[in-house]
Structure formats: structure tokens, C-alpha cells
Image (spheres, helix red, strand yellow):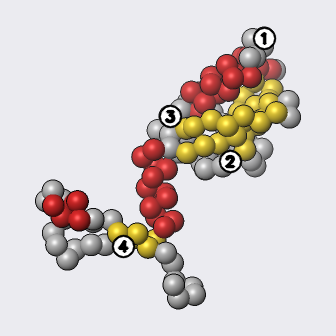
Amino acid sequence: MVAGVASKRKVNTVENVATGQAEPGTEKSLPIEAIASEEHATHGFKVTVIYNGVGKEFAVKPAESVKQLFDQAVMAFGITGNVHTLSLYNPGGQELSDAMTIKDAGIKPKDELLLRPSAVKAG
């Protein structure tokens, strides 16, 4: 490969041509970054939630709510008391709204989120 040229992957494969989803000679190439982004949107990705210094990995999908991830984390860490006082925080330290989707909250693959007491909920 020539230095500085992005890797590409065929999108319209022989199978697509054979099934009528693409016409011969119309193969398109996309940068690997675009393909990875497409795959995350469809299949989801992994993030880490850290609670009391312990990190656990969770698979999420962009359309899921932050509340769904929160509930999974609470169960995985075995938290039973004062759950209502906890919230998830993004890497920048901002509290995430339970009603937001993973995508709307700006959560990205490999992000490390914190599960800790909320100033609003605990007050």
C-alpha cells in the first residue's frame, strides 16, 4: 500500500451483484473509518463503566437509552442500596440524562464512564 492512502474495503461484493443489490462494475470503496462507524451504528460497541475504581465492560447500541446501560451496570456491580442516588458520567465529567440515547449522549466506542453519586439525585 502507498503511504498516506487510507485502506478501503469493497462494499458491493460479488454476492451483492448476484442478488441484484448492485450492478456489475459499481463496486464502491469506503474508508475503514466509515465502515467501522457503520458497524457501530448497526451492531453496537463496547464501553467501560467504572464504579469504586473497578471497571466492567458493557456492549451498547446507539439507540439504547442511558438508563438501560445504567440498569445493567447497577446489576453487574451488585448495587442494592441507594441506587436512586447514582448517575452515569461521561469522560468529561458531565452527568448523563437517563432519558437520552447512547448516541445522543455522545458515548463513543471504548469510552470510560463513571457510575457515582449524583449531585441532583442525592440532594
- x, y percent for residue 29: 36, 73
The residue depicted at 49 percent of the width and 75 percent of the height is: 7
Judging depth in this view, the residue of 98 and 10 nearest the camera is 10
**Kind of residue indicated by mark 2:** Asp
Which quadrant: the C terminus?
A: top right
**Kind of residue indicated by mark 3:** Glu
Which residue is labeled 4 in the image?
29
**Disc assigned to residue 111:** 2
Per the image, label 4 sits on a secondary structure element best described as: strand
Q: Which of marks 4 and 1 is nearer the N terminus?
A: 4
Structural distance between the alpha carbons of marks 3 and 1: 25 Å
**Disc assigned to residue 64:** 3
Q: Which of marks 3 and 2 is nearer the N terminus?
A: 3
Judging depth in this view, the residue of 64 and 1 nearest the camera is 1
Judging depth in this view, the residue of 111 and 84 nearest the camera is 111
Per the image, label 2 sits on a secondary structure element best described as: loop
